[in-house]
Image (cartoon, rainbow, N blue to C red):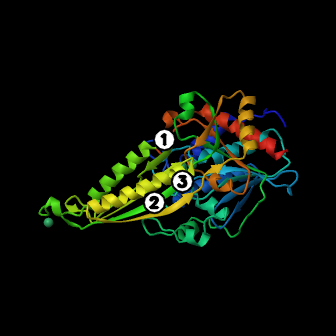
Amino acid sequence: MTMATLKTDPARLERFLTEIAAFGATKNGGVTRLALSDEDRDARNQLKAWFEAAGCETRIDRMGNMFFVRPGKNRALPPVMTGSHCDSQPQGGRFDGILGIIGGLEAVCALNDAGVTLERDLIVVDWTNEEGSRFTPGTTGSGVFAGKLDREAMYALTDREGLTFGGELERIGYKGMEDFDPRPLHANFEYHIEQGPVLERQGKTIGVPKGIVCLRWYDVEITGVPNHAGPTPMNERKDAVYAFARMASDIFEIGLASDNVVATVGEVHPSPNSRNVIAGNLHFTIDVRGWDEGETDRVCADIEKAVRTHAEVTGTTVDIRRTWEVERAPFHPQLVSMIRETAGELGLPALDMVSGASHDTVYINQFAPSAMIFVPSIGGRSHAEVEETSWADCAAGADVLLNCIIKTCND
Ligand code: HGY
Ligand code: MN
Ligand code: MN
Ligand code: MN
Protein backbone atom coordinates (compact mmCIF):
# COMPACT_ATOMS: atom_id res chain seq x y z
CA MET A 1 0.00 0.00 0.00
CA THR A 2 1.55 3.34 -1.03
CA MET A 3 2.23 5.94 1.66
CA ALA A 4 0.21 9.16 1.40
CA THR A 5 2.47 11.51 -0.51
CA LEU A 6 0.59 13.47 -3.15
CA LYS A 7 -1.00 16.78 -2.12
CA THR A 8 -3.81 18.88 -3.54
CA ASP A 9 -3.43 22.55 -4.51
CA PRO A 10 -5.10 24.58 -1.71
CA ALA A 11 -5.33 27.77 -3.81
CA ARG A 12 -7.07 25.98 -6.69
CA LEU A 13 -9.44 24.21 -4.27
CA GLU A 14 -10.32 27.55 -2.67
CA ARG A 15 -10.89 29.08 -6.11
CA PHE A 16 -13.23 26.25 -7.20
CA LEU A 17 -15.21 26.46 -3.93
CA THR A 18 -15.44 30.25 -4.11
CA GLU A 19 -16.58 30.29 -7.73
CA ILE A 20 -19.20 27.52 -7.33
CA ALA A 21 -20.61 29.31 -4.26
CA ALA A 22 -21.66 32.15 -6.58
CA PHE A 23 -24.46 29.95 -7.92
CA GLY A 24 -27.33 30.74 -5.56
CA ALA A 25 -25.23 33.05 -3.39
CA THR A 26 -27.29 34.85 -0.70
CA LYS A 27 -26.53 38.34 0.60
CA ASN A 28 -25.48 36.89 3.99
CA GLY A 29 -22.73 34.68 2.58
CA GLY A 30 -24.66 31.44 2.20
CA VAL A 31 -26.31 29.74 -0.78
CA THR A 32 -29.84 28.91 -1.81
CA ARG A 33 -29.32 26.34 -4.58
CA LEU A 34 -32.42 24.15 -4.33
CA ALA A 35 -32.54 20.89 -6.26
CA LEU A 36 -33.47 21.33 -9.94
CA SER A 37 -33.60 25.12 -9.64
CA ASP A 38 -31.95 27.48 -12.15
CA GLU A 39 -29.10 27.89 -9.66
CA ASP A 40 -28.65 24.09 -9.52
CA ARG A 41 -28.66 23.96 -13.32
CA ASP A 42 -26.03 26.69 -13.62
CA ALA A 43 -23.80 25.06 -11.01
CA ARG A 44 -24.15 21.71 -12.81
CA ASN A 45 -23.11 23.37 -16.06
CA GLN A 46 -20.04 24.81 -14.34
CA LEU A 47 -19.09 21.46 -12.79
CA LYS A 48 -19.43 19.74 -16.18
CA ALA A 49 -17.16 22.34 -17.79
CA TRP A 50 -14.50 21.99 -15.08
CA PHE A 51 -14.50 18.15 -15.10
CA GLU A 52 -14.39 17.95 -18.89
CA ALA A 53 -11.54 20.47 -18.97
CA ALA A 54 -9.76 18.10 -16.56
CA GLY A 55 -10.16 15.23 -19.02
CA CYS A 56 -13.21 13.49 -17.56
CA GLU A 57 -16.11 11.93 -19.47
CA THR A 58 -19.61 13.04 -18.35
CA ARG A 59 -22.47 10.54 -17.99
CA ILE A 60 -25.96 11.68 -16.86
CA ASP A 61 -28.60 9.16 -15.81
CA ARG A 62 -32.37 9.43 -15.79
CA MET A 63 -32.39 10.92 -12.28
CA GLY A 64 -29.98 13.65 -13.35
CA ASN A 65 -27.13 12.10 -11.36
CA MET A 66 -23.91 13.36 -12.99
CA PHE A 67 -20.98 10.90 -13.20
CA PHE A 68 -17.61 12.42 -14.12
CA VAL A 69 -15.29 9.57 -15.15
CA ARG A 70 -11.46 9.86 -15.09
CA PRO A 71 -10.24 6.89 -17.18
CA GLY A 72 -7.83 4.43 -15.56
CA LYS A 73 -5.31 2.10 -17.25
CA ASN A 74 -7.61 -0.90 -16.95
CA ARG A 75 -11.17 0.17 -17.59
CA ALA A 76 -12.52 -3.30 -17.02
CA LEU A 77 -11.66 -3.11 -13.31
CA PRO A 78 -14.39 -2.10 -10.81
CA PRO A 79 -13.98 1.68 -10.42
CA VAL A 80 -13.57 3.84 -7.32
CA MET A 81 -16.31 6.38 -6.65
CA THR A 82 -16.43 9.64 -4.72
CA GLY A 83 -18.73 12.64 -4.79
CA SER A 84 -21.68 14.21 -2.96
CA HIS A 85 -24.43 16.72 -3.79
CA CYS A 86 -24.65 20.18 -5.37
CA ASP A 87 -28.07 21.15 -4.05
CA SER A 88 -28.39 23.14 -0.82
CA GLN A 89 -30.89 23.98 1.85
CA PRO A 90 -32.74 27.30 1.56
CA GLN A 91 -30.35 29.90 3.08
CA GLY A 92 -27.91 27.00 3.36
CA GLY A 93 -24.13 26.87 3.52
CA ARG A 94 -21.33 27.13 0.93
CA PHE A 95 -19.69 23.79 1.88
CA ASP A 96 -22.45 21.20 2.54
CA GLY A 97 -22.31 18.66 -0.29
CA ILE A 98 -20.41 20.71 -2.84
CA LEU A 99 -17.13 20.23 -0.92
CA GLY A 100 -17.29 16.53 -1.76
CA ILE A 101 -17.69 17.15 -5.48
CA ILE A 102 -15.03 19.88 -5.60
CA GLY A 103 -12.73 17.68 -3.48
CA GLY A 104 -13.10 15.03 -6.20
CA LEU A 105 -12.41 17.62 -8.90
CA GLU A 106 -9.28 18.80 -7.09
CA ALA A 107 -8.12 15.17 -6.76
CA VAL A 108 -8.52 14.78 -10.55
CA CYS A 109 -6.53 17.99 -11.15
CA ALA A 110 -3.77 16.99 -8.70
CA LEU A 111 -3.45 13.59 -10.42
CA ASN A 112 -3.29 15.34 -13.80
CA ASP A 113 -0.58 17.72 -12.52
CA ALA A 114 1.43 14.74 -11.30
CA GLY A 115 0.92 12.92 -14.62
CA VAL A 116 -0.55 9.96 -12.76
CA THR A 117 -2.83 7.45 -14.49
CA LEU A 118 -4.46 5.18 -11.94
CA GLU A 119 -5.19 1.50 -12.52
CA ARG A 120 -8.94 1.92 -12.06
CA ASP A 121 -11.41 4.49 -13.35
CA LEU A 122 -12.24 7.20 -10.82
CA ILE A 123 -15.86 8.41 -10.87
CA VAL A 124 -16.85 11.69 -9.18
CA VAL A 125 -20.62 12.03 -8.74
CA ASP A 126 -23.10 14.86 -8.23
CA TRP A 127 -26.14 13.08 -6.73
CA THR A 128 -29.47 14.77 -7.45
CA ASN A 129 -31.59 16.23 -4.61
CA GLU A 130 -29.74 15.03 -1.53
CA GLU A 131 -31.31 17.66 0.74
CA GLY A 132 -34.97 16.76 0.27
CA SER A 133 -35.98 20.32 1.10
CA ARG A 134 -37.79 21.23 -2.13
CA PHE A 135 -38.71 17.66 -3.10
CA THR A 136 -39.15 15.15 -0.26
CA PRO A 137 -37.62 12.63 0.47
CA GLY A 138 -33.94 13.49 0.23
CA THR A 139 -31.09 11.47 -1.27
CA THR A 140 -33.44 10.94 -4.19
CA GLY A 141 -30.80 10.46 -6.91
CA SER A 142 -28.70 8.05 -4.87
CA GLY A 143 -31.81 6.31 -3.52
CA VAL A 144 -33.11 5.51 -7.01
CA PHE A 145 -29.61 4.51 -8.13
CA ALA A 146 -29.46 2.11 -5.16
CA GLY A 147 -32.85 0.68 -6.11
CA LYS A 148 -34.38 1.86 -2.81
CA LEU A 149 -36.63 4.60 -4.25
CA ASP A 150 -38.85 4.29 -7.32
CA ARG A 151 -37.90 6.59 -10.21
CA GLU A 152 -41.45 7.15 -11.49
CA ALA A 153 -42.66 7.94 -7.96
CA MET A 154 -39.79 10.43 -7.60
CA TYR A 155 -40.65 12.03 -10.95
CA ALA A 156 -44.18 12.64 -9.55
CA LEU A 157 -42.96 14.44 -6.38
CA THR A 158 -44.18 18.04 -6.27
CA ASP A 159 -42.76 21.13 -4.61
CA ARG A 160 -44.85 23.78 -2.84
CA GLU A 161 -45.62 25.48 -6.15
CA GLY A 162 -46.95 22.16 -7.53
CA LEU A 163 -44.02 21.73 -9.94
CA THR A 164 -43.02 18.08 -10.42
CA PHE A 165 -39.53 16.62 -9.93
CA GLY A 166 -39.65 15.05 -13.42
CA GLY A 167 -40.84 18.27 -15.02
CA GLU A 168 -38.15 20.35 -13.34
CA LEU A 169 -35.43 17.83 -14.19
CA GLU A 170 -36.49 18.10 -17.85
CA ARG A 171 -36.75 21.90 -17.67
CA ILE A 172 -33.16 22.33 -16.47
CA GLY A 173 -31.95 19.93 -19.15
CA TYR A 174 -30.56 17.24 -16.85
CA LYS A 175 -32.96 14.36 -17.39
CA GLY A 176 -30.42 11.94 -18.81
CA MET A 177 -31.38 9.34 -21.37
CA GLU A 178 -29.38 6.45 -19.93
CA ASP A 179 -29.06 4.27 -16.85
CA PHE A 180 -25.31 4.62 -16.42
CA ASP A 181 -24.36 1.88 -14.00
CA PRO A 182 -20.65 1.40 -13.21
CA ARG A 183 -21.26 -1.28 -10.58
CA PRO A 184 -19.65 -3.30 -9.07
CA LEU A 185 -17.65 -0.57 -7.36
CA HIS A 186 -14.29 -1.23 -5.73
CA ALA A 187 -14.71 1.54 -3.09
CA ASN A 188 -16.73 4.69 -2.43
CA PHE A 189 -15.60 7.73 -0.41
CA GLU A 190 -17.69 10.78 0.44
CA TYR A 191 -15.81 13.86 1.62
CA HIS A 192 -18.08 16.19 3.65
CA ILE A 193 -18.12 18.83 6.38
CA GLU A 194 -18.99 17.42 9.81
CA GLN A 195 -21.98 19.79 10.25
CA GLY A 196 -21.65 19.54 14.03
CA PRO A 197 -19.40 20.79 16.89
CA VAL A 198 -17.34 17.69 17.75
CA LEU A 199 -14.15 18.08 15.65
CA GLU A 200 -13.73 21.76 16.51
CA ARG A 201 -14.29 21.13 20.25
CA GLN A 202 -11.79 18.26 20.25
CA GLY A 203 -9.26 20.19 18.15
CA LYS A 204 -9.16 17.54 15.40
CA THR A 205 -8.82 18.11 11.65
CA ILE A 206 -10.18 14.86 10.20
CA GLY A 207 -13.37 13.09 11.30
CA VAL A 208 -13.54 9.34 10.69
CA PRO A 209 -17.22 8.32 11.03
CA LYS A 210 -17.96 4.64 11.59
CA GLY A 211 -21.32 5.19 9.90
CA ILE A 212 -24.46 7.30 9.52
CA VAL A 213 -27.38 7.34 11.98
CA CYS A 214 -30.78 5.96 11.06
CA LEU A 215 -33.46 8.50 10.13
CA ARG A 216 -37.27 8.73 10.37
CA TRP A 217 -39.30 11.56 8.75
CA TYR A 218 -42.94 12.27 9.64
CA ASP A 219 -45.61 14.49 8.11
CA VAL A 220 -48.34 15.52 10.57
CA GLU A 221 -51.72 17.09 9.64
CA ILE A 222 -53.74 18.68 12.47
CA THR A 223 -57.41 19.49 11.80
CA GLY A 224 -59.29 21.91 14.08
CA VAL A 225 -62.10 24.36 13.48
CA PRO A 226 -61.24 27.67 11.77
CA ASN A 227 -63.02 30.56 13.43
CA HIS A 228 -62.95 34.28 14.16
CA ALA A 229 -60.17 35.35 16.53
CA GLY A 230 -62.46 37.83 18.29
CA PRO A 231 -65.90 36.54 19.28
CA THR A 232 -64.97 32.84 19.75
CA PRO A 233 -64.81 31.95 23.48
CA MET A 234 -61.45 30.42 24.50
CA ASN A 235 -63.07 27.25 25.90
CA GLU A 236 -64.89 26.58 22.64
CA ARG A 237 -61.87 26.67 20.33
CA LYS A 238 -60.40 23.76 18.38
CA ASP A 239 -57.21 25.61 17.55
CA ALA A 240 -54.71 23.76 15.30
CA VAL A 241 -51.88 26.12 16.31
CA TYR A 242 -52.50 25.53 20.02
CA ALA A 243 -52.53 21.75 19.45
CA PHE A 244 -49.26 22.07 17.49
CA ALA A 245 -47.63 24.17 20.22
CA ARG A 246 -48.33 21.44 22.81
CA MET A 247 -47.10 18.71 20.44
CA ALA A 248 -43.92 20.56 19.42
CA SER A 249 -43.00 21.27 23.02
CA ASP A 250 -43.34 17.58 23.93
CA ILE A 251 -41.37 16.47 20.83
CA PHE A 252 -38.44 18.65 21.92
CA GLU A 253 -38.63 17.39 25.53
CA ILE A 254 -38.77 13.74 24.41
CA GLY A 255 -35.68 14.28 22.24
CA LEU A 256 -33.90 16.13 25.05
CA ALA A 257 -34.64 13.30 27.50
CA SER A 258 -33.11 10.70 25.19
CA ASP A 259 -29.29 10.50 25.31
CA ASN A 260 -28.60 9.44 21.74
CA VAL A 261 -31.66 10.35 19.70
CA VAL A 262 -32.48 13.78 18.29
CA ALA A 263 -35.88 15.11 17.23
CA THR A 264 -36.55 18.19 15.14
CA VAL A 265 -39.65 20.04 13.97
CA GLY A 266 -38.37 21.80 10.87
CA GLU A 267 -41.43 22.79 8.83
CA VAL A 268 -44.63 24.38 10.17
CA HIS A 269 -47.48 25.41 7.83
CA PRO A 270 -50.61 26.78 9.59
CA SER A 271 -53.65 27.49 7.47
CA PRO A 272 -55.05 29.99 6.67
CA ASN A 273 -52.06 31.62 8.46
CA SER A 274 -53.90 34.85 9.20
CA ARG A 275 -53.48 36.85 12.38
CA ASN A 276 -57.20 37.18 13.09
CA VAL A 277 -58.24 33.62 12.26
CA ILE A 278 -58.09 30.62 14.60
CA ALA A 279 -56.15 28.13 12.47
CA GLY A 280 -58.29 25.24 11.25
CA ASN A 281 -55.35 23.27 9.84
CA LEU A 282 -51.66 22.88 10.41
CA HIS A 283 -49.09 20.67 8.64
CA PHE A 284 -45.73 20.10 10.29
CA THR A 285 -42.75 17.77 9.93
CA ILE A 286 -40.69 15.73 12.38
CA ASP A 287 -37.13 14.46 11.82
CA VAL A 288 -35.90 11.78 14.28
CA ARG A 289 -32.39 10.27 14.15
CA GLY A 290 -30.19 7.99 16.23
CA TRP A 291 -27.39 5.47 15.91
CA ASP A 292 -29.38 2.76 17.71
CA GLU A 293 -32.44 1.76 15.64
CA GLY A 294 -34.32 0.33 18.66
CA GLU A 295 -33.83 3.44 20.77
CA THR A 296 -34.78 5.65 17.82
CA ASP A 297 -38.00 3.72 17.28
CA ARG A 298 -38.84 3.90 20.98
CA VAL A 299 -38.50 7.69 20.82
CA CYS A 300 -40.68 7.67 17.70
CA ALA A 301 -43.37 5.71 19.57
CA ASP A 302 -43.29 8.23 22.43
CA ILE A 303 -43.59 11.10 19.96
CA GLU A 304 -46.49 9.50 18.10
CA LYS A 305 -48.30 8.91 21.44
CA ALA A 306 -47.74 12.51 22.56
CA VAL A 307 -49.03 13.89 19.26
CA ARG A 308 -52.24 11.84 19.51
CA THR A 309 -52.77 12.78 23.17
CA HIS A 310 -52.46 16.52 22.51
CA ALA A 311 -54.90 16.26 19.61
CA GLU A 312 -57.44 14.65 21.91
CA VAL A 313 -56.93 17.18 24.69
CA THR A 314 -57.37 20.13 22.29
CA GLY A 315 -60.40 18.70 20.48
CA THR A 316 -58.53 18.51 17.19
CA THR A 317 -57.91 15.48 14.99
CA VAL A 318 -54.47 14.45 13.74
CA ASP A 319 -52.99 12.32 10.98
CA ILE A 320 -49.35 11.38 11.64
CA ARG A 321 -47.55 9.52 8.83
CA ARG A 322 -43.99 8.18 8.69
CA THR A 323 -43.13 9.37 5.19
CA TRP A 324 -39.47 8.31 4.96
CA GLU A 325 -37.06 6.14 6.87
CA VAL A 326 -33.48 5.10 6.24
CA GLU A 327 -31.67 2.41 8.17
CA ARG A 328 -28.37 3.03 9.90
CA ALA A 329 -25.33 2.80 7.59
CA PRO A 330 -22.24 1.20 9.19
CA PHE A 331 -19.22 1.86 6.93
CA HIS A 332 -16.65 -0.61 5.58
CA PRO A 333 -14.10 -1.21 8.40
CA GLN A 334 -11.05 -1.45 6.10
CA LEU A 335 -11.88 1.85 4.39
CA VAL A 336 -12.54 3.50 7.77
CA SER A 337 -9.07 2.32 8.89
CA MET A 338 -7.55 3.53 5.62
CA ILE A 339 -8.90 7.05 6.25
CA ARG A 340 -7.57 7.04 9.82
CA GLU A 341 -4.12 5.78 8.65
CA THR A 342 -3.95 8.21 5.73
CA ALA A 343 -4.70 11.13 8.06
CA GLY A 344 -1.88 9.87 10.28
CA GLU A 345 0.54 9.63 7.34
CA LEU A 346 -0.33 13.24 6.51
CA GLY A 347 0.20 14.31 10.11
CA LEU A 348 -3.47 15.27 10.55
CA PRO A 349 -5.12 14.70 13.97
CA ALA A 350 -8.16 12.44 13.44
CA LEU A 351 -11.16 11.44 15.52
CA ASP A 352 -13.46 8.42 15.25
CA MET A 353 -17.10 9.46 15.37
CA VAL A 354 -20.63 8.86 14.04
CA SER A 355 -22.32 10.97 11.36
CA GLY A 356 -25.42 12.66 12.81
CA ALA A 357 -26.16 14.03 9.36
CA SER A 358 -27.38 11.81 6.57
CA HIS A 359 -25.63 11.66 3.21
CA ASP A 360 -25.88 9.95 -0.19
CA THR A 361 -23.48 7.35 1.17
CA VAL A 362 -26.35 6.03 3.29
CA TYR A 363 -27.55 4.40 0.05
CA ILE A 364 -24.22 3.87 -1.77
CA ASN A 365 -23.09 1.95 1.30
CA GLN A 366 -25.76 -0.64 0.56
CA PHE A 367 -23.99 -1.85 -2.60
CA ALA A 368 -20.39 -0.66 -2.35
CA PRO A 369 -17.69 -0.64 0.36
CA SER A 370 -17.98 2.93 1.65
CA ALA A 371 -16.56 5.40 4.16
CA MET A 372 -16.59 9.15 4.74
CA ILE A 373 -14.01 11.86 5.49
CA PHE A 374 -15.10 14.79 7.67
CA VAL A 375 -13.56 18.19 8.30
CA PRO A 376 -14.62 20.62 11.05
CA SER A 377 -17.57 23.02 10.82
CA ILE A 378 -16.66 26.32 12.50
CA GLY A 379 -18.94 26.87 15.48
CA GLY A 380 -20.53 23.51 14.66
CA ARG A 381 -22.91 25.32 12.35
CA SER A 382 -24.42 23.98 9.09
CA HIS A 383 -27.66 24.22 7.11
CA ALA A 384 -27.21 27.94 7.77
CA GLU A 385 -25.62 30.84 5.88
CA VAL A 386 -22.84 31.09 8.47
CA GLU A 387 -21.64 27.55 7.59
CA GLU A 388 -17.86 27.75 7.38
CA THR A 389 -14.81 25.47 7.20
CA SER A 390 -11.28 26.90 7.08
CA TRP A 391 -9.48 26.70 3.73
CA ALA A 392 -6.67 24.83 5.46
CA ASP A 393 -9.09 22.18 6.72
CA CYS A 394 -10.73 21.95 3.28
CA ALA A 395 -7.31 21.24 1.77
CA ALA A 396 -6.42 18.75 4.52
CA GLY A 397 -9.58 16.74 3.91
CA ALA A 398 -8.96 16.86 0.16
CA ASP A 399 -5.43 15.48 0.71
CA VAL A 400 -6.88 12.55 2.67
CA LEU A 401 -9.43 11.95 -0.10
CA LEU A 402 -6.77 12.15 -2.83
CA ASN A 403 -4.50 9.61 -1.15
CA CYS A 404 -7.36 7.21 -0.34
CA ILE A 405 -8.34 7.42 -4.03
CA ILE A 406 -4.76 6.59 -5.08
CA LYS A 407 -4.55 3.67 -2.64
CA THR A 408 -7.85 2.10 -3.72
CA CYS A 409 -7.50 2.84 -7.44
CA ASN A 410 -4.14 1.11 -7.46
CA ASP A 411 -4.85 -1.88 -5.27
O1 HGY B 1 -30.53 16.10 6.59
C1 HGY B 1 -29.36 15.75 6.44
O2 HGY B 1 -28.80 15.15 7.31
C2 HGY B 1 -28.60 16.07 5.18
O3 HGY B 1 -27.70 17.11 5.46
N1 HGY B 1 -29.46 16.46 4.11
MN1 MN C 1 -24.79 17.20 2.74
MN1 MN D 1 -27.37 19.04 4.06
MN1 MN E 1 -63.95 40.46 10.18
The reply to whether callout 1 and callout 3 are in contact (CB within 8 Å) is no
- Report the amino acid beneath label 1: Asp
- Count residues near mark 3 (Cα–Cα under 10 Å), then give few for <14, some for 14-19, many for 20+: many
Quadrant assignment, res 371: top right
Q: CA distance from mark 1 to mark 2?
A: 21 Å
Asked if residue 409 lies left or right of residue 360, the reply is right
In the displayed orientation, state which residue is furthest to the right.
74
- Between disc 1 and disc 3, the foreground one is 1
- Report the amino acid beneath label 3: Leu
- Between disc 1 and disc 2, the foreground one is 1
Q: Which residue is mark 2?
A: 218
Q: Which residue is mark 1?
A: 259
Q: Residue at x 71, y 27 (%)?
A: 347
Q: Secondary structure at mark 3?
A: strand
Question: In front here: 326 or 261?
Answer: 261
Question: In front here: 403 or 7?
Answer: 403
- Count residues near mark 1 (Cα–Cα under 10 Å), then give few for <14, some for 14-19, many for 20+: few
* Location of the N terminus (image quadrant): top right
> Any mark on residue 89, and which?
none
Q: Position of residue 256 (x, y in %)?
A: 42, 43
Q: CA distance from mark 1 to mark 3?
A: 16 Å
Q: Position of residue 230 (x, y in %)?
A: 13, 61
Q: Which residue is mark 3?
A: 215
